[in-house]
Amino acid sequence: MEPAVLTGTHYMTGDEACAEGALAAGCLFFGGYPITPATEVAERMAERLPGVGGVFIQMEDEIAAMASIAGASCAGVKSMTSTSGPGFSLMMENLGLAIVTETPCVVVNVQRAGPSTGLPTQGAQGDMYQARWGSHGHYEIIALAPASAQDIFYQTIRAFNLSEKYRTPVLVMTDEVIGHMSERVVIPRAEEITVFNRPRAKGRKDRFKPFEPGPLGVPPMAIAGEGYNIHVTGLTHDERGYPVMSVDCQREMMARLIGKIQNNLDDIIEVEGYLLDDAEIVLISYGVSARTSRAAADEAREMGCKVGFLRLATVWPFPEKHIRELAQRVKGFITVEINFGQIHREVERAVQGKAPCFLAGHCGGTVISPDAVLDIIRREF
Amino acid sequence: MESAKKGKTQSKQPPRHPLDDWLRTDRMPHIWCPGCGIGTAFSACLSAMAATGLPKENFVMVSGIGCSARGAGYANVDSYHTTHGRAIPFATGLKLANPDLNVVVFSGDGDLFAIGGNHFIHAARRNVDLTVVCVNNYNYGMTGGQVAATTPHLAKTTTTPRGNPENPFNIPLLAFAAGAAYVARWTMLHARDLMDSIEEALKKPGFSFIEVLSPCPINYGRRNKEKALDTLHIYQEQTIIKNGAHPAELEGRQDGKIVLGKFWDVAKPSCNELYEKTCRPDFGKDHAA
Ligand SMILES: Cc1ncc(C[n+]2csc(CCOP(=O)(O)OP(=O)(O)O)c2C)c(N)n1
Ligand code: SF4
Ligand SMILES: [Mg+2]
């Protein structure tokens, strides 16, 4: 056996740190398909999983990859996949299956510039709405956005923990720059890492209802082979897991699926404030653009402007409350992201006209320079 | 069968069927139409599972989407009704994550060979230890009878109103060529052979494939002048059993007969076994996943 937790100080890429985070969280199954700039996550898992008792498989496509991790999770094993835009598109149907069947798993999207094949080796943040709404139907999703190699290690662990706790797929929405950049990564000792495992079925096997909610609105999970004879379907189902084709059943199922996320926002949402106390202008950002924003805030302070910064480590569910609170007291917002305004729209929605909202956006292919942000500050404030 | 032996509450309860333990009786009646062959194929599958004598809790049934794929919803084992075409990769994840599971994929021809065709050939190539039972009713029953990758040339369906211009797959040949360890074809009328075949497949490591021809009188039969009973007559009179026949020689016989039987049965290491040997030869037996 090799150690799952590589305690120590390392110099590694974001993709590698992502894989190490997954292993530290207890991931023992990876089903994937190669795609730039996410391939290194798969390669690291292929190298590492056999030694820690897990299984790596390169599936025939991303549809199969997503199906395989859902299957592995139903067998009780923490599972993940990693991909980028084109593969993320292919995963959408089975992502919906995992949501509705409450199957924990982690999907990493190392974003590159799209649409379509786009700029395979160059970063972007254009899949943020796809992360939110890419599968059909209305649903809640958890998406995290790491801002460094160290952070991706940590956010990947958090992704597994949230996915297990709420029995839902969790997305790690990183990008090419974070994925490919080598940085210092400190991996703590295993005992220092909090690992959460899904609530498990107990009690009488003949009476167990696989979708009867437990604490937090999350049903304890029976895994294949335990003798509970559960039925799991993507059809609208009742607490027994049986399909029921009625509006009442749809309403009840949807209310719980949405509720288990919406009622636990404080636990799920993580944001980081920087120089916010006296801030008059607030930069909102996530992922690699958080680094642009931090630099821009520092430079603006040197210019004498009271600029602060809110980093969304959780992007979905959207930290609406935090932004609404800031909107009461600041002069304006600038959202910094490598697209033409996806999270910017959410910010506008949360601000509800209480302050002007601007976008420092970009077509993708490179990072946004702090100057682009400073230009907006000079021009608009 | 076990349940019949117990006979505890005979006086009060209605008589029990030998498959009651394997069937979600609380979900009856099922959705299948009168004259449909899926139920017979399904009970052959459940009977085979019971006949193996293997621990019931280790059986898992996985289905895709379609009339046949409703099977998973009626099997009283851990059962997963997944997405259209994706039963096999889901089942692959289950099996690789827990090698002790005995994973049965029960699904339709459209599900396994049109939308799911790619997964089928790769699972066969990898020799994933699954038993795949394909109910072939020559069309997409659930969506109202459209052309499938198995619909005979010139047959009428709602999307081939002038007759099917394309040719169907010879699916046993496909399974054989892709690397399956076990390949058989029966009709649902040959329920006993079918059951024996599935039982054999379940006990066999590696990728086993069994095609079951089955009438869909409502959507296929109706448009091709075949009443349910006519289809059964075809299964009786126009079939020939040739165990060991080469899968390449199944189609296009001069006498027009459909060849049934066990065509292929070889021993080769399964996907799980190969992974262990190749990726962690020194790991020992007790791996966690
Ligand atoms: C992605 C997707 N495409 C299309 C459908 C619609 N659909 C449901 S069942 C089915 C065909 C099923 O045919 P088959 O597998 O042969 O099963 P049968 O009903 O004949 O048993 C289709 C196309 C779907 N559910 N999902
Ligand atoms: S539509 Fe055809 S395949 Fe589906 S249940 Fe009816 S007869 Fe059977
Ligand atoms: Mg069919």
Image (cartoon, coloured by chain):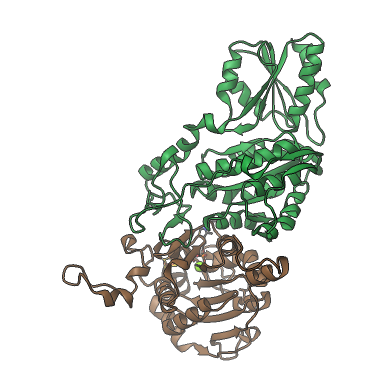
Image vertical order of residue A131 relative to residue A307, above or below: below
Indicate the colour of chain A.
green
List x then y, in percent, for residue A31: 65, 56
Q: State left or right for residue B140 relative to residue A353.
A: left
Quadrant in which residue A1 is drawn: bottom right
Question: Quarter holding the N terminus of chain B?
Answer: bottom left
List x then y, in percent, for residue A359: 72, 22
Question: Residue at position x 67%, y 51% from top?
Answer: A4
Image vertical order of residue A68 relative to residue B177, above or below: above
Image vertical order of residue A360 relative to residue B71, above or below: above
Question: Residue at position x 60%, y 58% from top?
Answer: A68
Closest to the observer: A355 or A177? A177
Closest to the observer: B28 or A265? A265
Q: State left or right for residue B179 relative to residue B87.
A: right
List x then y, in percent, for residue B200: 51, 81
Question: Quarter holding the C terminus of chain B?
Answer: bottom right
List x then y, in percent, for residue B84: 54, 58
Q: State left or right for residue B31 relative to residue A233.
A: left
From this viewpoint, is residue A171 visible? no
> Which quadrant of the figure shows ligand 2?
bottom left
Image vertical order of residue A113 relative to residue A348, above or below: below
Label total for image = 0
Indicate the colour of chain B.
brown
Quadrant in which residue A310 is drawn: top right
Question: Residue at position x 63%, y 42% from top?
Answer: A157
Question: Residue at position x 51%, y 76% from top?
Answer: B202
